[in-house]
Amino acid sequence: MAGRRCSERAVSEIAPINPWLLEKLVCPVTRTPLRWDAARSALVSDAAGLAFPVRDGVPVLVVREAVAL
Protein backbone atom coordinates (compact mmCIF):
# COMPACT_ATOMS: atom_id res chain seq x y z
CA MET A 1 0.00 0.00 0.00
CA ALA A 2 2.86 2.39 0.75
CA GLY A 3 4.14 2.00 -2.82
CA ARG A 4 0.77 3.03 -4.16
CA ARG A 5 0.75 6.19 -2.05
CA CYS A 6 4.18 7.17 -3.37
CA SER A 7 2.97 6.57 -6.91
CA GLU A 8 -0.09 8.76 -6.32
CA ARG A 9 2.07 11.54 -4.92
CA ALA A 10 4.38 11.40 -7.94
CA VAL A 11 1.45 11.64 -10.36
CA SER A 12 -0.22 14.48 -8.47
CA GLU A 13 2.99 16.52 -8.54
CA ILE A 14 3.14 16.13 -12.30
CA ALA A 15 -0.55 16.28 -13.27
CA PRO A 16 -2.93 18.88 -11.86
CA ILE A 17 -5.59 16.16 -11.62
CA ASN A 18 -6.41 13.87 -8.74
CA PRO A 19 -4.53 10.57 -9.39
CA TRP A 20 -7.66 8.52 -8.64
CA LEU A 21 -9.59 10.47 -11.29
CA LEU A 22 -6.74 10.24 -13.79
CA GLU A 23 -6.86 6.44 -13.55
CA LYS A 24 -10.60 6.48 -14.36
CA LEU A 25 -10.64 8.92 -17.28
CA VAL A 26 -10.94 7.59 -20.83
CA CYS A 27 -10.94 9.18 -24.26
CA PRO A 28 -14.48 10.19 -25.28
CA VAL A 29 -13.76 9.01 -28.84
CA THR A 30 -12.03 5.65 -28.37
CA ARG A 31 -12.81 4.81 -24.70
CA THR A 32 -9.10 4.07 -24.17
CA PRO A 33 -7.08 5.38 -21.19
CA LEU A 34 -5.66 8.89 -21.27
CA ARG A 35 -2.16 9.81 -20.19
CA TRP A 36 -0.85 13.09 -18.80
CA ASP A 37 1.56 14.95 -21.08
CA ALA A 38 3.34 17.62 -19.02
CA ALA A 39 4.87 19.28 -22.09
CA ARG A 40 1.41 19.93 -23.54
CA SER A 41 -0.32 20.34 -20.16
CA ALA A 42 -3.00 18.07 -21.55
CA LEU A 43 -4.47 14.59 -21.35
CA VAL A 44 -3.45 12.65 -24.43
CA SER A 45 -5.28 9.88 -26.24
CA ASP A 46 -2.68 8.05 -28.26
CA ALA A 47 -5.39 5.95 -29.91
CA ALA A 48 -7.30 9.00 -31.19
CA GLY A 49 -4.27 11.23 -31.70
CA LEU A 50 -5.84 13.98 -29.60
CA ALA A 51 -4.73 16.12 -26.66
CA PHE A 52 -7.48 17.29 -24.30
CA PRO A 53 -6.81 20.48 -22.30
CA VAL A 54 -6.96 20.72 -18.53
CA ARG A 55 -8.26 24.07 -17.28
CA ASP A 56 -7.99 24.95 -13.60
CA GLY A 57 -7.47 21.28 -12.81
CA VAL A 58 -10.59 20.21 -14.71
CA PRO A 59 -10.19 17.94 -17.76
CA VAL A 60 -12.07 19.25 -20.80
CA LEU A 61 -13.02 16.06 -22.61
CA VAL A 62 -14.89 17.76 -25.44
CA VAL A 63 -13.69 16.67 -28.88
CA ARG A 64 -14.01 20.14 -30.43
CA GLU A 65 -11.70 21.49 -27.67
CA ALA A 66 -9.03 18.83 -28.33
CA VAL A 67 -5.89 19.45 -30.35
CA ALA A 68 -4.77 16.94 -32.98
CA LEU A 69 -1.31 15.50 -32.33
Image (cartoon, grey):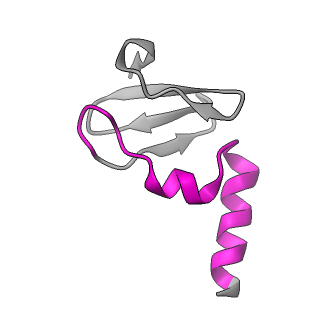
Looking at the rendering, which quadrant does residue 59 occupy? top right
Bounds of the magenta segment = 3-31
Give the residue at x 23% y 38%: 30
Image quadrant in which the N terminus is located: bottom right
Q: Magenta stretch: residue 28 in it?
A: yes
Total marks placed: 0
Give the residue at x 37% y 37%: 45
Query: In the displayed image of the protein, which residue is found farthest to the bottom?
Result: 1
Query: In the displayed image of the protein, which residue is found farthest to the left?
Result: 30
Looking at the rendering, which quadrant does residue 26 occupy? top left
Give the residue at x 72% y 28%: 56
Q: Give the overall secondary structure of the magenta segment.
A: helix
Q: Is residue 65 above or below residue 52?
A: above
Horizontal relation, residue 16 to residue 62: left or right:
right
Give the residue at x 63% y 38%: 38
Q: Is residue 5 above or below residue 67?
A: below
Q: Magenta stretch: residue 68 in it?
A: no
Query: In the displayed image of the protein, which residue is found farthest to the top?
Result: 64
Horizontal relation, residue 45 to residue 47: left or right:
right
Q: Give residue 23's position: percent from left, percent from top.
A: 49, 57
Image quadrant in which the C terminus is located: top left
Q: Give residue 20's position: percent from left, percent from top.
A: 58, 60
Q: Is residue 32 above or below residue 8?
A: above
